[in-house]
Image (tube, helix red, strand yellow):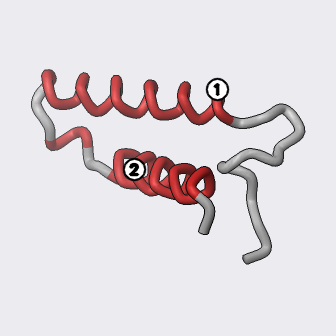
Amino acid sequence: MNQQVEQGYRMHCVLSNLSRLDVDQLDDADRERVETARDLLEEVSLLTRPEDGSGPDAPTDD
């Protein structure tokens, strides 16, 4: 697996895990940390994805 695809996959996994957290069970400070982490990861994902959809976050047929 090439490095860009592997990094994109890791980012996807982290975002998925953050999205699955039950933030209602966290205190306000931790909830804010999760929200900040999620926003930053989504921003990085958008910045690293080429407009033609061929970047590391693009779906593959593998």
Q: Is residue 29 left or right of residue 39?
A: left
At x 29%, y 49%, the residue is 21
Q: Nearer the viewer, residue 51 or 17?
A: 51
The C terminus lies in which quarter of the figure? Answer: bottom right
Three-letter code, disc 2: Val
Q: Is residue 10 left or right of residue 21?
A: right
Where is 53 relative to 40, above or below?
below
Where is 50 relative to 12, above or below?
above
Q: How many marks?
A: 2
Three-letter code, disc 1: Leu
Mark 1 vs mark 2, CA separation in Å: 17 Å
Where is 50 relative to 4, above or below?
above
The N terminus lies in which quarter of the figure? Answer: bottom right
- Read off the residue under disc 1: 47
Image depth: mark 1 or mark 2 in front: 1
At x 62%, y 57%, the residue is 5
The reply to whether discs 1 and 2 touch (Cβ–Cβ < 8 Å) is no
**Mark 2 closeness class: few <14, some 14–19, many ≥20 residues within 10 Å:** some
Query: Where on the picture, by quarter, is residue 59?
Result: bottom right
Q: Nearer the viewer, residue 43 or 26?
A: 43
